[in-house]
Image (cartoon, rainbow, N blue to C red):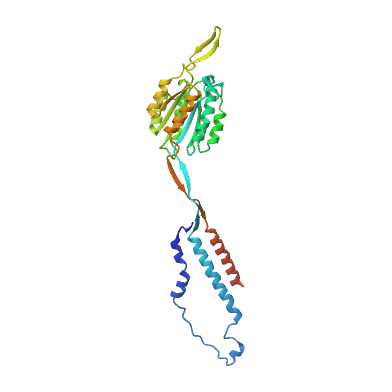
Amino acid sequence: MFEFVSPWLLLLLPLPWLVWRLAPEKKKTISSGLYIPFADDLQLVTPAQHAIMPQRWLLWIAVIAWCLLVLAVARPQWLGEAVELSRSGRDVMLAVDLSGSMKVKDFTLKGQQVNRLTAIQSLAGAFIDRREGDRIGLILFGSQAYLQSPLTFDRTTVQIFLQEAVIGLAGENTAIGDAIGLAVKRLKDTINNTDLVMILLTDGMNTSGELSPEEGIQLAKEIGLRIHSIGMGATSMQVPSFFGSQTINPSRDLDEEMLQRIASETGGQYFRARDSQELERIYTLIDQLEPVQREQEMFRPVQALMMYPLSLAILLGFCLLWLRAR
């Protein structure tokens, strides 16, 4: 549809005519002159006919230019069809453990044994794809925590950074407290800080870093950061030994009590991922806990049209000056 931003300015259209009608007339002055009895013969009283037409054209050009200028000032614009925008308003930070223990191959994907990081990379991609409307960030941590991707709507880039992660890139130990502290630092100054979510994936206990998990919890509670923690690793695994196959617990170093405390005190939930199927179900549960579409917004694209009448008015103004100069 077509509309004016300031339609009341169209009332200025008759302004020049009102000024002409209401302005006081210029008083005629009588001056002495010389009487010439044969003035008609010299054609000095009546102007030439060819001089009348240009004056009328100048008047019409000025009227059209004024009308175009008023239309431009009223700011005409074209409103397009309404477009529906889906937004959740959530800022989601993924924190992925890259410590040395993540290389344990106790997960199965498509019939092949893979390590824990590969399982995360494979299944987290679909989760990130479903978070349309959210801003996603990525933290990688080991002995130290690093921000691999700031909060962004570009989910493809976040997936690329996650796929490029390598075990041991951030060190062999596990700094869970530093990962939470870094997430708090990056989330506390965001514009939309009402729905802040962190998904923490680890397979061990806090063995490194400047912050303890308890200090990280306090920082998260101060800004309202909700943390969903996921403990990675199977409970039993067959490994070869000198006496044949032996059953071990590859998750013996997993501090589930700490992860449960992190989740419960920040308003999140703790999940246990023993295999790929459980990890996939966890991502689905998180989608239910943190639904993507919370509200719908309508947007109408606007195309400004004022440059068209304004350009024509300026062009006619130059034409008027040129004709008057001639």
Q: Tell me the residue at 49%/61% (across/down).
A: 73
Quadrant the C terminus occupies:
bottom right
Q: Tell me the residue at 48%/30% (across/down).
A: 94
130 or 39: nearer the eye? 130
76 or 1: nearer the eye? 1
Q: Position of residue 161 (x, y in %)?
A: 55, 31
Residue that lies at the very extreme toward the front in this rendered image:
111
Q: Tell me the residue at 59%/92% (across/down).
A: 38
Above-or-below relation of 294 to 241 = below
Above-or-below relation of 304 to 127 = below
Residue that lies at the very extreme toward the bottom in this rendered image:
37
Q: Position of residue 109 (x, y in %)?
A: 55, 24
30 or 210: nearer the eye? 210
Q: Is residue 184 visible?
A: no
125 or 56: nearer the eye? 125
Residue that lies at the very extreme toward the top in this rendered image:
243
Q: Is residue 84 visible?
A: yes
Q: How many marks?
A: 0
Q: Position of residue 248 (x, y in %)?
A: 49, 13
